[in-house]
Image (cartoon, helix red, strand yellow):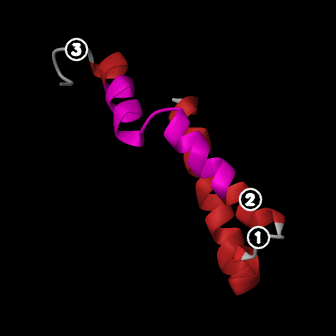
Amino acid sequence: MCKWWAPKVAHDAITQCLLLHGQFGYRTDKPIEQRMRDVLGLQIGDGTAQIMKLIIARQSAGRQFAP
């Protein structure tokens, strides 16, 4: 569950930072923009959120209840 939850929370936090800083948050010389790219890479590299949720559902409910 942590493999799905941690990148999601990190993405939400960085999105809030970008909204707080406005257009300066998207500048390539600022670390916030780099963190956003890093977190997006984490989300893709660890597997999509849908697959992670399916794995969690199978472990929690059992194979017969989750496709």
- Indicate which disc residue 44 carries: none
Q: Determine whether the residue tagged by mark 1 lies in a helix, strand or loop.
A: loop
User: Rounded to the nearest whole Å, what is the CA distance between mark 1 and mark 2?
Assistant: 7 Å
Q: Label 1 belongs to which residue?
A: 28
- Dot 3: few (<14), some (14–19), or many (≥20) neighbours within 10 Å? few
- Indicate which disc residue 34 carries: 2
Q: Nearer the viewer, residue 28 or 32?
A: 28
- Look at label 1 and name its amino acid: Thr
- Indicate which disc residue 63 carries: 3
Sequence order check, earlier mark of 2 and 3: 2
Which residue is most to the bottom? 23
Q: Which residues are magenta?
A: 37-57
Q: Nearer the viewer, residue 28 or 24?
A: 28
The image position of residue 54, as x and y in percent, is 32, 29
Name the residue: 70% across, 85% down: 23
Where, quadrant-wise, is the C terminus in this rendering?
A: top left
Q: Of discs 2 and 3, which sits in the foreground?
A: 2
Compared with 14, 44 (above or below) is above
Main SS, magenta region, reads helix
The quadrant holding residue 25 is bottom right
Compared with 7, 14 (above or below) is below
- Look at label 2 and name its amino acid: Gln
Compared with 59, 37 (above or below) is below
